[in-house]
Amino acid sequence: MALARQRAGAAQKLANAAHWGEVGVIELSAIQQAEAAIDTLSHLGEPQAFVAAAHQALTTLAEQFRHDDGDADGYGLGTVHAIVRTLEDETP
């Protein structure tokens, strides 16, 4: 759900690149990296273990974006944080 919502937002920005510039590309890259990090955790069967590991992986990814000169305006970081917030909101 979080990835789909963020992906839709990135697609809208890609479609209006004249206004948004590279923002859609940056957001899509963040989504793809988050998805790749989460996919590596599919072997974890226990839901709580999966959520904890996903949270840690996304926190690490957020730190990478925080220090990435290519994300100077923070759109990638914001995208990862939005995914983390959704994960937290949807976890019982």
Image (cartoon, rainbow, N blue to C red):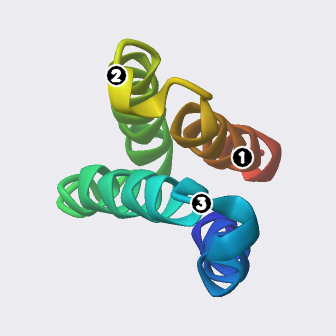
Q: Amino acid at mark 2?
A: Asp
Give the quadrant of the N terminus: bottom right
**Local crowd at mark 2 within 10 Å, few (<14), some, or many (≥20)?**
few
15 vs 60, left or right, is: right
Disc 1 target residue: 91
42 vs 48, left or right, is: left
Q: Amino acid at mark 1?
A: Thr
Disc 3 target residue: 21
36 vs 84, left or right, is: left
Q: Is residue 9 above or below residue 67?
A: below
Report the front residue among 38 and 28: 28
- Viewer-nearest of discs 3 and 1: 3
Residue at 27% x, 49% y is: 37
Residue at 74% x, 39% y is: 85
Disc 2 target residue: 68
Residue at 62% x, 81% y is: 11
Q: How far from the left and from the top, in percent, is residue 35?
A: 36, 62
Find the distance from the CA under tag 2 to the CA under tag 1: 29 Å
Q: Is residue 11 above or below residue 40?
A: below
- Viewer-nearest of discs 2 and 3: 3
Q: How far from the left and from the top, in percent, is residue 90?
A: 77, 53
Residue at 51% x, 24% y is: 72
As drawn, the residue found furthest toward the front would be 18
- Find residue 16 and report its image quarter: bottom right
- Find residue 81 and report its image quarter: top right
Report the front residue among 89 and 67: 67
Q: Amino acid at mark 3?
A: Gly
Q: Is residue 63 above or below residue 1?
A: above
Mark 2: which secondary structure? loop
Query: Counting residues from the N terminus, which is met first, the one under dot 2 or under dot 1?
Result: 2
Query: Counting residues from the N terminus, which is met first, the one under dot 3 or under dot 1?
Result: 3
Give the quadrant of the C terminus: top right
